[in-house]
């Protein structure tokens, strides 16, 4: 296997059968490297949660997670069962699936949401840094068990949400034969979800920036240095206190589903960037934006109802039921991402950081952050038994991260061969460019046309580079990226689909967006003047830098 | 013949004048006779004499126009679910006789909205009497062409959720101990015209026990549109779902059986369901051949 000119060693197969499976990267969630601990936790939570959720719904699908060459790979496919057994299983699961998609609202409010809050409250109530090694070991076990449970909820929800949305989209398509797939999304937009609420809760803090010296401290430095600049400015006390409270409430989220990545609380640059642009552009009131989106939604609902006026009652009532379920799904999808995926990841990270602290104090590892390069059982054993020096192991794994940092790992491993023997073209790396190299095709995700300079951001660390009115180009944009949506004039991502986080939130922000534009960060030069047509799914390169 | 000498130009369904088949045609007369006991959509009838007078006067006279306008306003003033929407059907004097059925031979206008559209529909219905198809049919059946006038029935439109036809005997075998019901989604026109495969149930007349149920794949349906009707695709979730619930099926069968008993001849009815409400749209004798086309 060749990559970036170098020969990669055979992947480290974990289980029998691994060597034959078709593995793919998930660029939407894991565009970069993952650490040893990330790999172990993701495998435990995602693989385990998915397996249990499928069993609960009698669905014959498997999801396996591996870390090859320090990158995340997954196998996503049918369970290895005889075809007739699989069919029978799917048949049996029909009533469960119907029930799952029609009871989302009730289950979310009565069962899932209270449980999610209970888990988050558990982590809020205990400061892991105050625990001794013994107590920490048992807190870690509780944490892992709660993580298991949350990821089971995540996938149970995911099944229900996707069924609800699919049922609505199918009926919408049959009834209205929409000219654009975006049309069916409008009735699902403009809800008060946690992601956009985080923006609206930041909005009032603008008033605390009014004093000139505070304003200068915030705007005079790059967003990543803004917090320090404000802390050094004596008159910024009220703003610093308000930001602290804001980050305590809204910042306990990870930018990616990675335990090794700092939360917004730890690295508030995206929030500072957003606040800065709120100050610079007072017209971008997120409350007004939400109200406008809600108005559009109500108009779209009214239009659909008017078009159904002449239809038989069973059609009208079924449409209402599926619309309501899909609207719930739209809200719950954002909220459960916020609460489960990103919030729990930040809480679990904190527990591991506390473990790292304890292990560094004991001399097992050199520094607290080294814990991100350990396996779960290594952390547990070290907390309970102590003694073993893991520093050399951490050094090797850090060296491995450095070694593979520069490679471009293959998108597929064992891609199924096509008829003529060539590998199936699943690598999306080249498909974004067609005949005209200046016209790039992706997937329409949020309507609208915008022109601006392209700003290619490969990670959130580069957040300072995005200036107002620029077109944000990224491989993927997790929840922590959403503060940037208020700054950008349009969004282009390599991964995603119509229902992925970036697309959903872009519509909430009325931000033109094209997703699934493969190779966008390579094909669009940083600084190029581009035009993004979000309804057509097209990006035009108007002028290269 | 003088319209003024033969009574009012317009008579209302359910009134005694509207039960004279020589004046309003058998179709309207049957329906009018049933209007007191059955949920027949409200309506009025332009009599055959009115048609004859219009032939003599060269169409709709100003007086007749204002009479139609007044009747239309009265019919739709307390607009129900369908607002100002009405159905216009011809009711020929020799139609629905016990021997021949002119079903479908004279034009029907559905979802007619507004006085201008109504007047145009009435003229269209009148013109259809002389249409090729109707004349050919009439000649083939030996019906006299002597009485070329028809009545026009104007009724409140029912925007049906599901609709169909029912027979108080098996139209294929003539078995008198059967009630056969066909229904599909939307307006009943597609069932009557045979353009789709409806659901069909056969019940034993004595005890209304279900003998046979055949669910059709109801791919298309007729629904009202802004003006008139249009055919649309039935959403897939609904195609294989029975168009009548059990209690609705039973109600149709009961009505069919009761109408046969009351009328004294085997009946062929058209019905519609709208938000759980039953409506009787037609009731005529089953023709001698026992078949419907």
Image (cartoon, coloured by chain):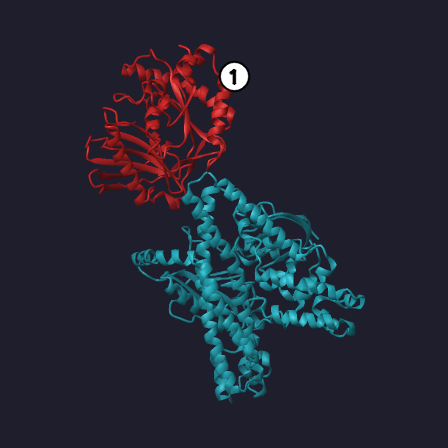
Chain colours: A cyan, B red
At x 51%, y 41%, the residue is A306
The one of A457 and B204 positioned closer to us in this rendering: B204
On the image, which quarter does residue A4 sit in?
Answer: bottom right
At x 45%, y 61%, the residue is A106
- Residue A6, given in percent of the width and then of the height, sits at 54, 65
The one of A76 and B249 positioned closer to us in this rendering: B249
- Judge left or right: residue A132 versus residue A524: left
User: The residue marked by circle 1 belongs to what chain?
Assistant: B
User: Compared with residue A381, is residue A114 higher up or lower down, i.e. above or below?
Assistant: above
User: Compared with residue A526, is residue A242 higher up or lower down, i.e. above or below?
Assistant: below
Q: Secondary structure at mark 1?
A: helix
- Residue A287, given in percent of the width and then of the height, sits at 65, 57
Residue on which disc 1 sits: B62
Which residue sits furthest bottom?
A387
- Residue A189, given in percent of the width and then of the height, sits at 56, 53
At x 44%, y 62%, the residue is A107
Query: In this rendering, does residue A433 appear at all?
Result: no
Q: How many marks are shown on the rendered structure?
A: 1
On the image, which quarter does residue A21 sit in?
Answer: bottom left
């Amino acid at each position: 296997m060749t990559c970036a000119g170098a020969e990669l060693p055979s992947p480290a197969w974990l289980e029998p059968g691994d060597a034959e499976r078709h593995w793919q990267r998930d660029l939407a969630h894991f565009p970069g490297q993952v650490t040893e601990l990330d790999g172990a936790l993701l495998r435990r939570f995602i693989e385990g949660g998915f397996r249990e959720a499928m069993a609960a719904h009698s669905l014959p699908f498997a999801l396996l997670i591996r870390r090859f060459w320090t990158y995340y790979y997954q196998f996503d496919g049918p369970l290895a069962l005889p075809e007739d057994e699989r069919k029978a299983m799917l048949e049996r699961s029909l009533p469960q699936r119907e029930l799952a998609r029609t009871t989302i609202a009730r289950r979310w409010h009565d069962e899932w949401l209270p449980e999610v809050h209970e888990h988050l409250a558990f982590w809020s109530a205990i400061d892991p840094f105050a625990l001794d090694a013994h107590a920490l070991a048992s807190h870690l076990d509780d944490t892992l068990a709660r993580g298991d449970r949350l990821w089971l909820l995540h996938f149970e929800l995911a099944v229900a949400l996707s069924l609800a949305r699919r049922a609505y989209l199918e009926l919408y398509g049959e009834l209205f034969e929409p000219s654009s797939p975006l049309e069916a999304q409008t009735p699902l937009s403009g809800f008060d979800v946690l992601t956009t609420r985080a923006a609206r809760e930041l909005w009032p803090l603008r008033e605390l920036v009014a004093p000139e010296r505070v304003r200068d401290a915030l705007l005079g430095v790059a967003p990543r240095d803004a917090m320090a600049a404000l802390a050094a400015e004596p008159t910024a006390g009220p703003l610093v206190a308000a930001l602290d409270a804001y980050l305590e409430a809204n910042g306990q989220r990870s930018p990616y589903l990675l335990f090794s990545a700092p939360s917004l609380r730890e690295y508030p640059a995206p929030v500072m960037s957003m606040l800065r642009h709120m100050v610079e552009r007072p017209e971008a009131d997120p409350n007004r934006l939400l109200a406008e989106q809600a108005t559009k939604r109500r108009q779209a609902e009214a239009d659909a109802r008017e078009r159904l006026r002449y239809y038989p009652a069973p059609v009208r009532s079924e449409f209402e039921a599926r619309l309501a379920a899909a609207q719930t799904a739209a809200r719950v999808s954002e909220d459960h991402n916020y609460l489960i995926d990103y919030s729990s990841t930040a809480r679990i990270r904190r527990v591991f950081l506390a473990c790292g602290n304890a292990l560094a104090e004991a001399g097992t590892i050199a520094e607290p952050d080294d814990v991100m390069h350990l396996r779960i059982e290594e952390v547990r054993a070290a907390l309970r038994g102590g003694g073993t020096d893991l520093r050399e192991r951490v050094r090797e794994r850090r060296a491995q991260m450095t070694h593979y940092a520069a490679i471009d790992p293959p998108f597929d491993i064992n891609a199924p061969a096509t008829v003529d023997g060539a590998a199936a073209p699943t690598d999306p790396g080249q498909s974004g460019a067609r005949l005209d190299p200046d016209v790039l095709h992706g997937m329409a995700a949020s309507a609208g046309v915008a022109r601006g300079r392209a700003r290619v951001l490969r990670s959130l660390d580069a957040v300072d580079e995005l200036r107002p009115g620029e077109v944000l180009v990224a491989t993927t944009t997790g929840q922590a990226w959403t503060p940037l949506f208020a700054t950008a004039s349009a969004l282009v991502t390599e991964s995603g689909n119509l229902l992925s986080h970036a697309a959903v939130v872009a519509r909430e922000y009325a931000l033109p967006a094209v997703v699934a534009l493969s190779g966008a960060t390579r094909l669009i030069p940083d600084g190029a003047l581009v035009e993004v047509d979000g309804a057509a799914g097209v990006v035009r390169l108007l002028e290269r830098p | 013949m003088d319209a003024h000498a033969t009574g009012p130009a317009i008579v209302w369904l359910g009134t005694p004048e509207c039960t004279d088949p020589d004046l309003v045609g058998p179709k309207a007369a049957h329906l009018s006779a049933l209007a007191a006991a059955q949920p027949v959509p409200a309506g009025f009838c332009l009599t055959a004499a009115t048609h004859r007078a219009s032939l003599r006067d060269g169409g709709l006279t100003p007086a007749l126009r204002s009479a139609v306008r007044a009747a239309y306003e009265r019919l739709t003033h307390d607009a129900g679910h369908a607002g100002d929407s009405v159905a216009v059907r011809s009711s020929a004097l020799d139609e629905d006789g016990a021997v021949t059925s002119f079903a479908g031979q004279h034009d029907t206008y559905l979802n007619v909205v507004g006085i201008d559209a109504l007047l145009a529909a009435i003229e269209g219905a009148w013109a259809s009497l002389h249409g090729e198809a109707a004349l050919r049919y009439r000649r083939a059946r030996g019906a006299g062409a002597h009485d070329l006038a028809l009545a026009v029935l104007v009724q409140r439109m029912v925007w049906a959720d599901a609709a169909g036809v029912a027979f108080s005997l098996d139209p294929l075998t003539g078995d008198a101990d059967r009630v056969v019901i066909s229904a599909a989604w939307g307006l009943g026109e597609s069932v009557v015209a045979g353009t789709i495969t409806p659901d069909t149930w056969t019940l034993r007349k004595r005890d209304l026990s279900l003998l046979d149920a055949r669910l059709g794949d109801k791919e298309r349906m007729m629904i009202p549109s802004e003006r008139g009707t249009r055919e649309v695709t039935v959403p897939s979730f609904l195609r294989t779902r029975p168009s009548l619930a059990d209690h609705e099926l039973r109600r149709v069968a009961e009505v069919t059986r009761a109408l046969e008993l009351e009328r004294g001849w085997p009946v062929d009815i058209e019905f519609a369901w709208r938000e759980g409400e039953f409506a009787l749209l037609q009731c005529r004798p089953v023709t001698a051949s026992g078949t419907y086309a």
